[in-house]
Image (tube, grey):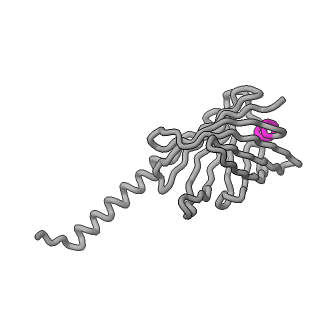
Amino acid sequence: MVHQTPFRNLRRVAAIAALGALTIVAGCSSVTPAKYAQQGPKFSFRDYFNGTVDAWGMFQGRDGEVIKRFKVTLKGTWDGPNGTLDENFVYADGTTEHRVWTLHQTGPDSYTATAGDIVGEAVGDQAGPAIRYAYTMAIPVSGTTYHFQFDDWMYQIDDEVVLNRATMRKFGVKLGEVTLSFRKRR
């Protein structure tokens, strides 16, 4: 039997911690909305999410398997810099979900948002046709609620269509992706 010294175990723990830190850093997006500042059309988040918007989407696990498909109807209203976005989800299995976001425009191209299942605030930055929100969402799984981090990007394609891709992570490890296609009602 080989006896391991405490220093050998300490090195192993340090190596695992370093690997974990690298995973977290690698998992963070290095692209910011500023990269798209010179592109068009300029996404007016407030204008687009004012009125009714329909969306169709899916959640895929980290292996690419589609776990959930859904349709969402969103109704947005604004009063000055403050807005409300009321979302109603209908999943392919017939289940439903409701979320209300409270939005606040904090600058010409920046927003914060809260909702009942959001931990703290979602922070959004916009440039050109893109907006990125970063937030933590509390999601119940088998009777236990877990906190997952989202890196949520929206890209305006034209006056009617916005595409959305959000990556879900826990401890820096990618667990899945949400993809949505929004169409504004005229």
Q: Quadrant of the C terminus?
A: top right
Q: Give the magenta-colored segment's residue range.
A: 45-49
> Is residue 111 within the magenta segment?
no
Which percent across, then down, holds residue 115? Answer: 72, 56
Q: Is residue 90 left or right of residue 14?
A: right
> Magenta span: helix, strand or loop, mainly?
helix
Q: Is residue 167 left or right of residue 154?
A: left
Residue 183 vertical position relative to residue 22 in the rendered view, above or below: above
- Taking depth in this image into account, of 77 and 96 the one nearest to the observer is 96
Residue depicted at 61% across the width and 59% down the height: 138
- Which residue ends up furthest to the left in the rendered image? 1
Which percent across, then down, holds residue 63? Answer: 44, 41
Q: Quadrant of the N terminus?
A: bottom left
Residue depicted at 55% across the width and 58% down the height: 141
Q: Quadrant of residue 158?
A: top right
Which percent across, then down, holds residue 35? Answer: 61, 35
Residue 135 vertical position relative to residue 59 in the rendered view, above or below: below
Residue depicted at 66% across the width and 48% down the height: 95
Query: Can residue 129 be seen in the rendering of this structure?
Result: no
Residue 71 vertical position relative to residue 168 in the rendered view, above or below: above
